[in-house]
Amino acid sequence: MSLPFRIISSSSGAQRPPNGAATSKFFFCAKSNKEEATMQPCEELKDIVLHHYRKFDSREQADSIKEIYSLQEGVTIIGNDPNEWFDDRDSIIAFMKAGSSSKMDIAVQNLKAYSEDNVGWTMDRVTIRPPNGNELVVRHTRIFHKENGAWKMVHLHVSIAVPNENIG
């Protein structure tokens, strides 16, 4: 039997329904009726990310955020600090404005961008050198989708790499 969606099973949190039969939690992902789409490199998304980096340590960063981020509910930034979890546009803009006063030298490495239909994603590694001279390697992943023909970011995750042996 062919279903109009794929079933992705998650064995964690499995519960038995009232009839006692074993089951798992399932997540449903819509299948397209079109031919199987494939991810492709996306220079447009690379350009968006690089444009944003050029505005990083300036007062124009908040304007760049307003241009890049979606207006829809569900937009998120998850930063490296445990308190950096922002899930609405106003808190995202406030967070970015607070950081825009810091002058930093940023070197972008390994920027990759892909898209498939109306969804795109990027990942990169950047070396940040703040005025104190300490060098920090930061990793980013971003998710975009198209709104009215324009790419809009819906998620950003920031992490500072810590070697496994340094984790308790």
Image: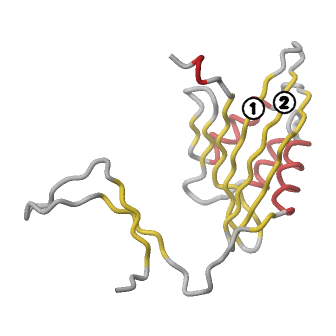
In the depicted view, which residue is nearer to us: 91 or 82? 82
Mark on residue 104? none
Q: CA distance from mark 1 to mark 2?
A: 6 Å
Q: Earlier in the sequence, mark 1 or mark 2?
A: 2
For mark 2, what is the residue? 127
The x, y position of residue 128, in whole percent, is 84, 27
Q: Secondary structure at mark 2?
A: strand
User: Which percent across, then down, holds residue 3?
Assistant: 39, 82
Q: Which mark is residue 138?
A: 1
Coloration mode: secondary structure
Q: Position of 28 compared to 44: left or right?
A: left
Tell me which residue sits at (74%, 48%) in the image. Answer: 123
Compared to residue 6, the image places residue 159 above or below, namely: above
The type of residue carrying mark 1 is: Val
Relative to 25, residue 148 above or below: below
Mark 1 packing: few (<14 Cα in 10 Å), some, or many (20+)? some
Q: Is residue 55 above or below residue 134?
A: below
Q: Residue at x 89, y 14 (%)?
A: 133
Report the side of 133 relative to 20 (left or right): right
- Please report the residue visible at 13 percent of the width from the left and 63 percent of the height from the top: 21
Vertically, is 69 above or below 103? below
